[in-house]
Image (spheres, coloured by chain):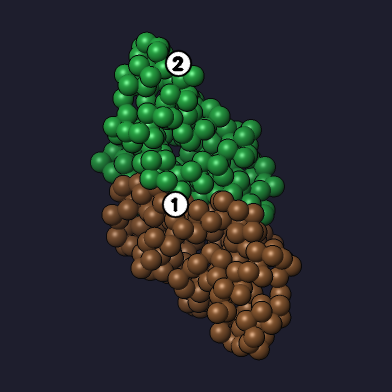
Chain colours: A brown, B green
Amino acid sequence: MLLDAAREVFAESGFDGATVRAIAARASVDPSMINHWFGGKQNLFAQAVLRLPFQPGDFVATAVAGPLDGLGDRLLRTFLSAWDSHPNAFPALVRGAASHELATEGFRDLVTSTILGPITEQVSADDAGLRATLCGAQLVGVGMARYVIRLEPIVSATPDVLADAVAPTLQRYLTGDISAGV
Amino acid sequence: MLLDAAREVFAESGFDGATVRAIAARASVDPSMINHWFGGKQNLFAQAVLRLPFQPGDFVATAVAGPLDGLGDRLLRTFLSAWDSHPNAFPALVRGAASHELATEGFRDLVTSTILGPITEQVSADDAGLRATLCGAQLVGVGMARYVIRLEPIVSATPDVLADAVAPTLQRYLTGDISAGV
């Protein structure tokens, strides 16, 4: 089965060393089909090793489509909509990413290329990488509080309440002044 | 040894069920000494089970001392100063907290009482609990990016750069308008 083959090859070769070609050969499928089904190595890793129940790139694409104004709100809402539907998947992801180097490395690559890459491109400023990464840190923090540590009142808060509180943070990271003092 | 006795009793009785008295009896020490050395059950749990290299309550006390104005900046800087000195302790904490229910429960209790409690008290508004928890989520997110996932440029950023970017977020969560739309 393709995901089993992918897990084997990632475990043997590491994230950087594993190639779509090697995984395809192990599973006896054509490499082009892997790109067609999964959109490349990062997403295959996300499904096979991190066991994500969806392709994170799809949600980011939804959020990034549209004007830079309002992107903070769209990022928060797509993040919540994705993970609220799979509340056990976020702790599993964190456990994996914190536990073994392969998962950490692959998770870092996934976040950087699939999630922060499209945001960085959309922001398009000299410090766009820092801005996108600050958004990522804030979203991961919301996920830790809501799904892993389970801190009230964040667990029970509606997406609207969280959007009112957190979307302006994301929007400031994306387009506001982030280098002035307090 | 006291920490071994604490680990045994926490493992047997769970976080809520374990008492300082039972741990003291197992270690053949006086319960008052545990409170004297560790400041209570949460901090003992932090050292014994979460294996924190410092007492988080001490850092929060440092940050909370002083005016509400500027608290966001002090929280961020004490957070970075504590964890930058022990960069491997944050991933270990996250791994533990995401992996077994005892650690999750104890971590939640530690965060709520030792970290968010003093902040909530200092903020002293109707929605102070939400405000403090939003700060906690943002700080945990910075820790995930800097110590666990290791996302650049957050890993290499100086405390000053991060304070310029993130302290205003914390200050807004503490004292700003968090219920208006974007």
Q: What element carries label 1?
A: helix
Taking the spot 40% from the left edge, 13% from the top edge, the residue there is B28
In this view, A76 is above or below A19: above
* Horizontal side of residue B88 vs B49, given as left or right: right
Q: Residues within 10 Å of mark 2 (few under 14, many from 20)?
A: few
Residue furthest to the right = A17
Is residue A129 found left or right of B177 in the rendered image?
Answer: right
What subunit carries mark 1? A
Q: Mark 2 lies on which chain?
A: B
Mark 1 belongs to which amino acid? Met
Label count reads 2
Give the residue drawn at x 38%, y 41%.
B102
**x, y (%) of residue A171?**
49, 61
Provide the residue designation for mark 1. Answer: A144
Q: Residue at x 37, y 10 (%)?
A: B30
SS class, disc 2:
helix
Residue B177 position (above or below residue A116)? above
Could you say where residue A5 lies in the image, as x and y percent from the top left?
Answer: 61, 75
Q: Does residue B176 sit above or below B15 in this rendering?
A: below
The foreground one among B34 and B59 is: B34
Separation of residues labelled 1 and 2 (CA atoms):
30 Å
Residue extending farthest to the left is B126
The reply to whether callout 1 and callout 2 are in contact (CB within 8 Å) is no
When the figure is inspected, residue B127 is found, relative to residue A100, above or below; the finding is: above
Residue marked by disc 2: B37
Determine which of the numbered discs, if any, sits on residue B62 in the image. none
Q: Quadrant of residue B68?
A: top left
* A16 or A73, nearer to the observer: A16
Query: Given the image, on which type of amino acid does mark 2 rest?
Result: Trp
